[in-house]
Image: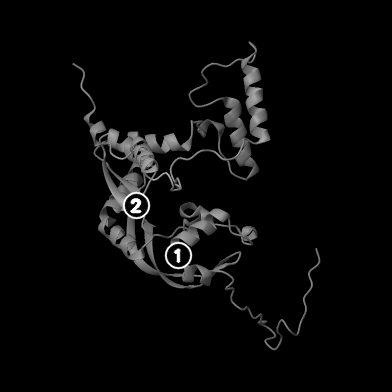
Amino acid sequence: MPKLNENYQNLKESFSEIAHRVNAYTASHPDKKIIRLGIGDVTLPLTSLAVSGLHAGVDAMAESATFKGYGPEQGYGFLRDAISAYYAKNNVTVDADDIFISDGAKSDTGNISELFSADNTILIPDPVYPVYVDSNLMNGKKITYLSGNADKEKTMACLSQNQEKIENMANAYLKQQGFDYHASLQLTNCYFPTRIYGDYVFPCGYYDAARITLGKGEGHNWWCVLYPQFCFVEEACTSVPGESVSRLEQALKEDDYLALKNNRPDVEIRFFLFPQFSADTIKVSFNR
């Protein structure tokens, strides 16, 4: 007699439950406008480039000479070559043989935990996209939630409580990748230099921070890896993307957010060899 996967009984509030609650609330409060923060729907049409590519693909499927069935498991060679060439234009070397064409990051993120034993504990932020919880529950994995609350005290307390778990997960991954050093998490007070992004000035000073050190910590900071929304090359510092602005407004108190805007420090130019000179007494011109 076939046995059922009893882990499915652990599924709780998923998409269907959310839909039931929304429908029930709408029925009992027809005068209320609901702001939906779930999956949502697309709001803009396809770009002309995407449309032309889809048409070309459909036309190819209508001819015997260009018809394609199931593609290679790693993805079509022409597509992997095109991706490799794209990175090459940006001075990044990626061999086409190292490229895998999947059906999207969402399913990859949901399925990647299948590479690990069910004995592993999965750390998931709360709130989170429900499929990441469901996919792990269905596999029988234990879940530890990391609060996504913007409150600093609660966040630091949660990190402190889960410090050993976070370090163990990081060390297990490092060992799996063949590295012989370890990771350590410190809740510390670090000095950060002044950073200016467009109209936003993050003043220098000492800030409470969660810092993960790999090995002796002699490498470079992974700022651009961990916080890509706030990582800009020098030429792009003249403006801040709208998504980053929205995140700042949500995460900071109103007074703190306003303090970041239009708060550029006054800069006085002095000359090392001729300190009597200043920006008011000398004019410098540059020719290209």
Quadrant for the C terminus, please.
bottom right
Q: Which mark is residue 181?
A: 2
Q: Position of residue 222 (x, y in %)?
A: 47, 55
Q: Residue furthest left?
A: 1
Is residue 147 left or right of 259 when viewed as pictured? left
Using the rendered view, name the quadrant where residue 198 is placed: bottom right
SS category of the residue bearing label 2:
loop
Which numbered disc flags the more N-terminal residue, 1 or 2?
Answer: 2
Q: Nearer the viewer, mark 1 or mark 2?
A: 1
Total count of labels: 2
How many other residues sit within 10 Å of disc 2, few (<14), some (14-19) or many (≥20)? Answer: few
Above or below, 129 against 212 in this view is above
Q: Position of residue 175 (x, y in %)?
A: 33, 45
- Rounded to the nearest angstrom, the CA distance separating label 1 from label 2 is 36 Å
Can residue 199 be seen by looking at this rendering? yes
Residue drawn at 67 percent across, 29 percent down: 52
Is residue 79 left or right of 224 when viewed as pictured? right
Q: From the viewer's side, name the closer residue of 247 and 180.
A: 247
Residue drawn at 45 percent across, 64 percent down: 252
Amino acid under disc 2: Tyr
Q: Position of residue 244 (x, y in %)?
A: 53, 56
Quadrant for the N terminus, please.
top left
Amino acid under disc 1: Leu
Residue drawn at 40 percent across, 60 percent down: 217
Q: Residue furthest top?
A: 64
Using the rendered view, name the quadrant where residue 274 is placed: bottom right
Q: From the viewer's side, name the closer residue of 92 and 80.
A: 80
Q: Which residue is mark 1?
A: 252
Q: How is the image coloured?
A: one colour
